[in-house]
Amino acid sequence: MPLPGFLARSALPVIAIIAGGMAAPALAASAPTTKVVSCAAGNCLVIWGSRERGSETVLINGHAVSVQGNRNWKVSLPVAQIRDWSQRYARTIEVSTIDAMGVVQTSAEARLPIGLLGGTTNLALLEVRVK
């Protein structure tokens, strides 16, 4: 059943706003992702992300890294190197891209696996009691 003229005209802006709001998340760039894998250095953190242009430089916590890929890229770094570049107990790393002029194009935080940069405690003895 068609809507009356006034109702149809007033509903169009509402429909346009709703449709526009639903399309916005699809246009947003996805946040970089991380995963720990085994590598020659012991354990490595693999970071995946995307950039507007393949010519942009990727920075991890402010350090330029050489990545594989073009617009969709990936890099594998030893966990020890990530520890050197991060604060203790950090839960995220900063992933940025800069253009040839040094202007930051994107900046996002990538979540780290839980406990990756936590401290370790060497125990001489662990006592467990059952009640």
Image (cartoon, rainbow, N blue to C red):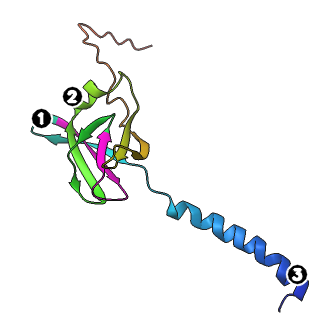
Q: Where is residue 8 in the image (x, y as percent from the top left)?
A: 83, 83
Amino acid tagged 2: Ala
Q: Is mark 3 on a helix, strand or loop?
A: helix
Residue drawn at the location 34% of the way across and 49% of the way down: 99
Give the residue pinned by disc 2: 80
Badge 1 crowding class, 10 Å Cα cut-off, few under 14, some 14 to 19, many 20 or more, is few
Amino acid tagged 1: Ala
Cα–Cα gap, marks 2 and 1: 9 Å
Return the disc, 1 or 3, that comes first in the chain's sequence.
3
Q: Do the residues labelled 2 and 1 touch (CB within 8 Å)?
A: yes
Instruction: Specify the principal SS of the magenta part.
Output: strand
Residue 23 lies, with reference to residue 31, above or below; the image says below
Give the residue pinned by disc 3: 7
Cα–Cα gap, marks 3 and 2: 64 Å
Cα–Cα gap, marks 1 and 3: 67 Å
Q: Give the range drawn in magenta.
A: 43-59
Badge 2 crowding class, 10 Å Cα cut-off, few under 14, some 14 to 19, many 20 or more, is some
Q: Where is residue 125 in the image (x, y as percent from the top left)?
A: 26, 7
Q: Is residue 15 left or right of residue 62?
A: right
Q: What element carries label 1?
A: loop
Q: Is mark 2 on a helix, strand or loop?
A: helix
- Judged from this view, the residue extending furthest toward the left is 40
Whether residue 49 is visible? yes
Return the disc, 2 or 1, that comes first in the chain's sequence.
1
The answer to which of 31 and 104 lies nearer the viewer is 104
Badge 3 crowding class, 10 Å Cα cut-off, few under 14, some 14 to 19, many 20 or more, is few
Whether residue 4 is visible? no
Give the residue pinned by disc 1: 41
The answer to which of 51 and 32 lies nearer the viewer is 51
* Front of the two marks 1 and 3: 3
Residue 85 counted in the magenta span: no
Return the disc, 3 or 2, that comes first in the chain's sequence.
3
